[in-house]
Amino acid sequence: EVGAAGSPGFQGDSTQMTFVAWVPTPSGWMERRTVTLSLAGGRLTGSADGSVILADSLRSGAFDYLAEYGSQTTWLSGWQSPVSAPIAVRIRLTRPTIDPERLATDTLVFRIGGRG
């Protein structure tokens, strides 16, 4: 829904992103809502109407944004646009393990729909 009338666009940096998306409601239909994902205090949280903890006990985390396809492209640390979204968003989450000398890193990549 980036670029739609009344939409704030897609805003993101390494610790927070905000965009408009169709979100299911408790009544069973979809409504446009502003969604925010944040990394702070060892947690990944998401909010549309209320806040939900998506991951906790994190050592670190970061959001990255892909501007174009290709093997030579790099991930960007921020995205600010009222009319377009990145092609994909990468979320990197690092957690401690049982072994204090080791960390576990999960990398999640989410493809974003067509660009506006």
Image (cartoon, rainbow, N blue to C red):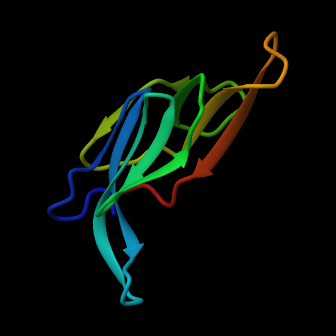
Residue drawn at the location 58% of the way across and 37% of the way down: 91
Quadrant location, the N terminus: bottom left
Q: Residue furthest right?
A: 99
91 relative to 85 in the view: left or right: right
Image coordinates of residue 101 in percent, x first then y, are: 81, 10
Residue drawn at the location 29% of the way across and 64% of the way down: 49
103 relative to 57 in the view: left or right: right
Residue 112 to residue 13: above or below: below
Q: Residue furthest top?
A: 101
Residue drawn at the location 59% of the way across and 52% of the way down: 111
32 relative to 93 in the view: left or right: left
Quadrant location, the C terminus: bottom left
Residue situated in front as seen by the camera: 41 or 81: 41
Residue situated in front as seen by the camera: 79 or 56: 56
Image coordinates of residue 79 in percent, x first then y, are: 37, 33
Residue drawn at the location 36% of the way across and 89% of the way down: 27
Based on the displayed image, in which of its 4 quarters is residue 30 positioned? bottom left
Based on the displayed image, in which of its 4 quarters is residue 48 positioned? bottom left
Image coordinates of residue 108 in percent, x first then y, are: 66, 43
Q: How many marks?
A: 0
Residue 110 to residue 29: above or below: above
Residue 115 to residue 37: above or below: below
Based on the displayed image, in which of its 4 quarters is residue 28 positioned? bottom left
Residue situated in front as seen by the camera: 52 or 1: 52
Q: Residue furthest left?
A: 6
Image coordinates of residue 66 in percent, x first then y, are: 54, 36
